[in-house]
Image (cartoon, rainbow, N blue to C red):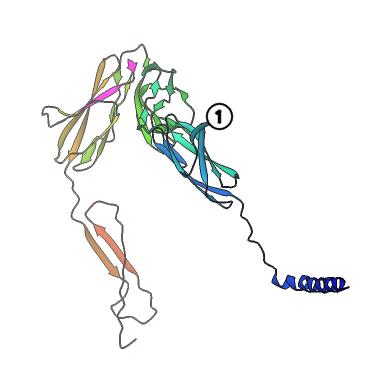
Amino acid sequence: MKKQHLTAFWLSLLMTIVWVLPAFTIHAEAVQLLSIDVAAPMEVFQGESITVRASGSGGTAPYQYYFSYKINNGNWTTLRNYSSVSSVSLTTSTAGNYTMRSFVRDAGGQSVYCDLSVQVREPYVTPSNISTVSSTVIQKGGTVTVKGLASGGTKPYQFKYYYVDQRGMEHIVKDYSTTASVPIKFNTPGYYTIHCTLKDKDGKVLDKAFNITVQYATGRAISNSSTLSTYSTSVGINININASANGGTQPYQYEYYYSTNGSTYIKLSSYTKTSKKTIQFSEPGYIKVKVIAKDLNGNTSQAVKSITVKNNTHRVLALNSSVSTTNLVEKNTNIVIKASGTGGIQPYRFAFQYRTTAVNGN
């Protein structure tokens, strides 16, 4: 009976504790999942080192680290087995895409890993433009093939193809692209300069030029048909010499001379591809201009033109002006200003200005 009574007592006490306990519940600390942070460069040059630094968190310390890598789609290679050292370095031997894998393992045996991609580029070499042309001398209607070639720098390369004619005009054949070869056809005899301009991925630009001769044999002897822009002029006024030739074997080159009042000829320029020359004279007199044309085979023909150079008769520039009214006019009155010039060199241009001054406070 005592025993039963005691049992009932302890049972009642236990029920009281069960109902009280929720007010004193102790929550266990949440366990964080194991994770890893990894740092490495995104890009290096071949021969440089890749340093990988890892850091574990969560799980149960202490941590151990394991490192491996592969190049492109090759096999995995271990850099360091599990240890407490959290970084590793690899000296790159070849260019390519390196995948760097880092593991962390905690004291409880959990492990996670992270992969980082590192691009290893070939060592930088200053770019060179080694483009070529199929020929530097062709016949009228012929074609020159230009090949865009390069070394060093940073791939991919782009090329721009254009040429400059004898008049200095630029003709673009193909703007920057990865096209590595273009044909250029020339239907007009003359001297041309073909350009192949290289641009690498880093924006480095290098130009290479080729001098091209497009020839044409007419079967006739060379003749000179050069002219002047005027045959009578004044001191200090520009005169254009327009060189021209026919026959022989094109293209032509020209040599320019002049003589004053029967004196010995003075050379303006040696043989040049330029077919226009500008000249002016500082003294009056009778001038002779001589142009010698030479064809591709060395045959020549000359033309002599005469010019009369006169003194500049213009007088010193002077201004004449007038107004349509007196110095004193009513407010809002229109005033006409007339201006004219004499002397100097016509045509004239005029500019008008005015200034206002208060009168009697108005």
Name the quadrant containing residue 131.
top left
Name the quadrant containing residue 253.
top left
- State the residue position of label 1: 73
Q: Is residue 42 visible?
A: yes
Look at the picture and state if 2 lies above or below 301: below
Q: Residue at x 41, y 33 (%)?
A: 46
Q: Which residues are magenta?
A: 248-256
Q: Residue at x 37, y 28 (%)?
A: 129
The C terminus - image quarter: bottom left
Which residue is farthest top?
219
Look at the picture and state if 276 lies above or below 347: above
Q: Nearer the viewer, residue 329 or 289?
A: 289
Side of 11 where 220 appears, left or right:
left
Q: Is residue 165 visible?
A: no
**Magenta stretch holds residue 347:** no
Q: Residue at x 20, y 43 (%)?
A: 236
Q: Amino acid at mark 1?
A: Asn
Q: Position of residue 161 (x, y in %)?
A: 43, 29
Q: Position of residue 219 (x, y in %)?
A: 36, 11
Side of 226 where 79 appears, left or right:
right
Q: Residue at x 54, y 28 (%)?
A: 75
Q: Position of residue 242 (x, y in %)?
A: 29, 30
Q: How many marks?
A: 1
